[in-house]
Amino acid sequence: MTNYELSVILPGTLSEDLVKEAGVKIGETIKGLGGEIKRADEPSHKRLAYAIKKIRNGIYLNFYLEMNPAMVLDLEKKLKLISEVVRYQVSKPKRAPVASPRRSIFKKETATTTEEYKTTTHAEAKKMSMEDLDKKLDEILGEEVSN
């Protein structure tokens, strides 16, 4: 069984009841093919980038499912037969990035370097008085003026 993401576009003119019925039909189709719905997002209304079958607004349904790869073609064929479906796309979802060893090592190095930096700069700042800072500033500005 492989994880898939199914995105379906329905016409924006459908009522909420018809949208729910279409969602139930799609869910039954998935279950009928041996798939299992892991999550279904709430329908969202969006304006389409271009007209599809003279429809400018669409209702998007997203399903996250687990299904046998051999049954995906059958799912696509059955989605074509559902009259409310304007467009659909079945894809493999991108996995959430898992913390790699390189990344965690990088975080540890930056944390130690930052702490060391803070301790050294604070220690130096405490030791210097205002007179020392003025002298240092005069030296730096004097060098810049002469260059």
Image (cartoon, rainbow, N blue to C red):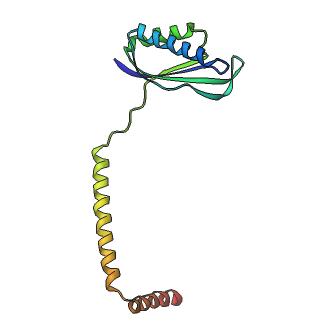
In the picture, measured across the screen, residue 23 lies left or right of residue 116, that is: right
Question: Of residues 134 and 25, which is closer to you in this image?
Answer: 25
> How many marks do you count on the picture?
0
In the picture, measured across the screen, residue 130 lies left or right of residue 120, that is: right
Q: Position of residue 1 (x, y in %)?
A: 33, 17
The residue lying at 30 percent from left, 59 percent from top is 111
Give the vertical position of 23 relative to 146 (above or below): above
Q: Residue furthest right?
A: 54
The residue lying at 30 percent from left, 43 percent from top is 100
Q: Position of residue 122 (x, y in %)?
A: 33, 76
In the picture, measured across the screen, residue 14 lies left or right of residue 25, that is: right
The residue lying at 51 percent from left, 10 percent from top is 25
Q: Position of residue 147 (x, y in %)?
A: 52, 87
Question: Of residues 86 and 18, which is closer to you in this image?
Answer: 18
The residue lying at 49 percent from left, 26 percent from top is 41
Question: Of residues 103 and 36, which is closer to you in this image?
Answer: 36
Question: Of residues 15 and 36, which is closer to you in this image?
Answer: 15
Q: Position of residue 96 (x, y in %)?
A: 38, 36
Give the vertical position of 63 relative to 100 (above or below): above
